Structures are given as C-alpha cells and as structure tokens.
Amino acid sequence: MKKALIIGGAVLGFLLTASLVIFIFFPGLPSFFKVKYQYKHINEKPNAFELVSVRADFKEFTLDGIKLKAPADCSLKLGGSGLKSASGEVELVVLQTNNKEQDETLASFQDYDPWDIYKYEQEDYKDFFRLIGTEPPQYGFSSKILFYIREYITSADCIRIRGKNKDIFFELANLKEKAMEAEDMQKLKSSNFTEYIGRIHRNGYEDIWNLSIFPDGDDLNSYLVTIKCGDETTAKQIISSIELE
C-alpha cells in the first residue's frame, strides 16, 4: 500500500511538473485548443487568384500609376482616374495613396483616430505582429492591418503569447472571423506587387471587385482599384491584365 502511494505520488509529481513546464514555455496552449473550435476560419488564408487570358480586342489604359486592359468601348472618366464603358456594364476607378502623407493627415485630425476602433495603440499591434514573425509596414498600417490579419493570424500564434499580446490575438481573431464571413478574398502575387481581391457577401454588391495593390519593397505607395462589372469573366480579364506603370 505504501509502495503504491509512493508510486502514485511520483506520477502525480511528474504530471504537475510537466504541466508547469507546458504552462511556462507554452502559456497559450489552452487557448490554442479553444481558438481552433471557436474560430472556424482562423487558419484560412486568401485563396490564390487564377490569372485568365485577356481578350485580344481589349484596349490598354493607364490610370494613376496602374496599367490595365478593358473592353474597347471604355473611355476615361473622373479626370483620368476612372473608366466607363459605353454600355455602362463596366465602371472602374483607381485611387493612388501616398501612405506617409495619409498617416500625417490622419494624425493632424483632432477628432479622429483610425485606431479608436481597436483596443490598443498602433505600436502595440506592430509589436504583436513582430512577435509572431511578421514585420509591419512603416506607413499605412491602419489601412493594411486587415490584410495582415487575414494573411498572418493563425491558431498557432497563441501558443507562446500571454498578457496584452494574448488579448490582442483574440481581438484580431474575432476581426478575422467577421471579415472572412463578410467577404471573399483572393490573393495575386505578381512579379513586383501583391494584390488582394475582395468581393462582399451582400445583395447588391456581387458585381463589385475591390483590388488593394501593394508594390513590393514600397511601403510609401498603395493602390485601390474598384471595378463594377456584372460579368465575372470580363472582371477577371481586367484584373489579370493589371500592371504597375
């Protein structure tokens, strides 16, 4: 009996020691299992966009730093920042953003802070992404963070984090779950830029394509191309033709 108690005590001591080691070195392990069941999209990333052939009769246009091809009946609108087809079936607008200037403009507003919708400050989120192995951009992070959430947040990230970073992880995991349910997103990796292609899950928005384009090695500039086109084949041909000027 005494021997059994000694053995039982040794086993219990081993289990407690093992649990302590796990807690010290993997403080987020219990959260890991919780996250995998609570967030069904947590390990999903944007699917790759498949390029398609562009019709030979499409016409080439250059709009605010973006070169693309569109149906030949399109003409420039909005001072050269947009296109519209004669039939009205295709509409397109390009917005080029200097992210440094945008950050400075936002910082000058006394009554508006893009980080007010988040629980912590911008630097806290930058530190979090560095902790999970991803370097945040120097400029335009308030606009880019959603793409970082969709691309880089996974259940494995919560294993080694604790305290504030654990709280940030759950905040971003919630945002990722909502974003994944609200919008289909695909990713196109070109030779000199990365492009995220989003389509919203809502009646009346099915023909809207939002393209967020980030040049490689250039945190200063980014582009938003919005396409309104009811024909998916035509929209995909326009997207497949996009290049930086």
Image: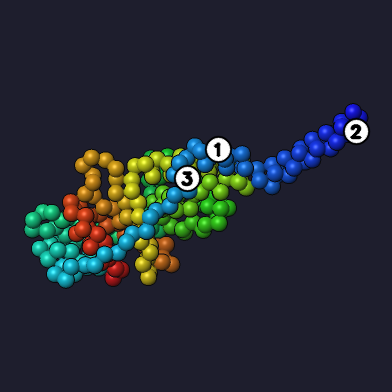
Q: Which residue is mark 1?
A: 34
- Residue 217, percent across and down? 43, 67
Q: Is residue 110 above or below residue 89?
A: above
Q: Which residue is mark 3?
A: 42
20 or 133: nearer the eye? 20
**Badge 1: how crowded within 10 Å, few (<14), some, or many (20+)?**
few
Identify residue type, mark 3: Ile
Q: Secondary structure at mark 2?
A: helix
Dot placed on the residue nearer the N-terminal end, 2 or 1: 2
From the image, state whether disc 3 or disc 2 is nearer to you: 2
- Residue farthest to the left? 86
Q: Measure the C-alpha gap from mark 2 to mark 1.
A: 39 Å
Q: Which residue is mark 2?
A: 3
- Looking at the figure, which quarter contains the C terminus? bottom left
- Residue 203, percent across and down? 23, 40
Q: Residue at x 21, y 67 (%)?
A: 54
- Residue 50, percent across and down? 32, 61
201 or 84: nearer the eye? 201
Q: Residue at x 38, y 69 (%)?
A: 192
